[in-house]
Image: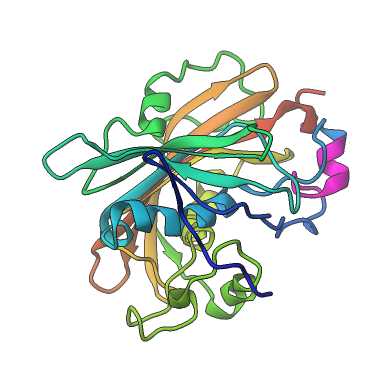
């Protein structure tokens, strides 16, 4: 599929990317929130586009805003506000850059529909750790849960370490033709020495911990509530061996969901350098679990 060129519009200091129509890559995952029938049973308009897919639309905008160093020491912290379905048009925006530390520069970012409905919102930055990123601030405000049923076996401090993680290149490249912003480094190893993982795929490398971290959590339909991806010594590559560690850092609840947060890191399996860090918040839908229905 041929994509229109990525063109940035400057609207008085706010950068706007082009309108795109993200594909719901997981629409055939029966029983998931991405499956039309399941999602509609749970009150959604249809199968949802996974939040990590939206990360890919931000990449060229953030490279425009922060420069090439964003790939090595940049971050994107997004809270997902309203879900979209397959092919719905959305547009990404980045506000002016603020100097918030000796080397740290930050900008507000958001995605919305042509009607102005906010899909996700957060912060992006470059130059090191940002203790005031959107998700760091949300975690600090997370109130403890009083009634956890799906997550009754999970607690803050649960951790796993040295989980092998490797992104299969052939499988990952099947997605490249249909992502909103295909980039040369996703297919051409000559540019960085290895093929770079598109953001949604890179996030999967840091999610390798979930099977072990939540081994006892079953019988629910979940969805991403928020994700923060930070490159510490990026980028993340395909067909490269990594090790992942993770710790549950918060749990919570709302009238319709149970909520769990974890932080994971990704290390090169050979030289042990830390390549990336992620914060993940998942919403476990109460209406999907026999423990609540």
Task: Report if residue 152 is visible in the image.
Answer: no
Kindly indicate the quadrant of the structure image that contains residue 218: top right
Q: Residue at x 68, y 16 (%)?
A: 255
Residue located at (28% from left, 61% from top): 72
Is residue 15 in sight in this rendering? yes
Work out which residue is located at the far left of the displayed protein and give it: 102
- Examine the rendered structure and indicate whether residue 255 appears above or below residue 68: above
Kindly give the residue lying farthest to the top in the view shown.
146
Q: Residue at x 40, y 75 (%)?
A: 240
In the image, residue 34 lies in the stretch drawn in magenta: yes
Could you tell me residue 60's position as x and y percent? 44, 59
From what the image shows, is residue 249 above or below residue 22? above
Horizontal side, residue 204 vs residue 70: left or right? right
Instruction: Locate residue 153, reporting x and y percent.
Output: 57, 32
Color scheme of the displayed model: rainbow
Q: Nearer the viewer, residue 54 or 286?
A: 54
Q: Is residue 280 magenta?
A: no
Q: Which residues are magenta?
A: 31-40
- Image height of 158 relative to 34, above or below: above
């Amino acid at each position: 599929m041929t994509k229109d060129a990525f063109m940035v519009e400057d609207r008085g200091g706010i950068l706007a990317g082009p309108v795109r129509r993200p594909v719901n890559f997981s629409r055939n995952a029966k029983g998931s929130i991405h499956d039309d029938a399941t999602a509609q049973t749970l009150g959604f308009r249809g199968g949802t586009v996974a939040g990590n897919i939206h990360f890919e639309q931000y990449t060229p905008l953030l490279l425009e805003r922060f420069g090439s160093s964003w790939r090595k020491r940049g971050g994107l912290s997004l809270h997902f506000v309203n879900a979209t379905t397959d092919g719905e048009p959305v547009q990404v925006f980045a506000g002016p850059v603020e100097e918030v530390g000796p080397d740290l520069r930050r900008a507000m970012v958001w995605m919305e529909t042509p009607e102005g409905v906010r899909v996700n919102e957060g912060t992006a930055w470059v130059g090191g750790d940002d203790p005031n990123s959107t998700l760091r601030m949300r975690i600090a405000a997370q109130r403890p849960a009083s009634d956890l049923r799906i997550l009754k076996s999970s607690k803050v401090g649960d951790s796993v370490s040295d989980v092998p993680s490797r992104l299969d290149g052939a499988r990952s490249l099947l997605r490249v033709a249909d992502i909103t912003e295909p980039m040369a480094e996703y297919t051409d190893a000559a540019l960085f020495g290895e093929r770079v993982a598109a953001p949604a795929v890179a996030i999967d490398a840091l999610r390798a911990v979930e099977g072990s971290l939540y081994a006892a959590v079953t019988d629910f339909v979940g969805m991403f509530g928020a994700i923060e991806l930070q490159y510490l010594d990026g980028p993340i590559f395909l067909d490269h061996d990594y090790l992942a560690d993770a710790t549950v850092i918060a749990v919570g609840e709302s009238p319709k969901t149970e909520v769990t947060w974890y932080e994971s890191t990704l290390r090169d399996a050979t030289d042990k350098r830390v390549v990336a860090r992620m914060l993940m918040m998942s919403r476990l839908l109460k209406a999907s679990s026999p423990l609540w229905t």
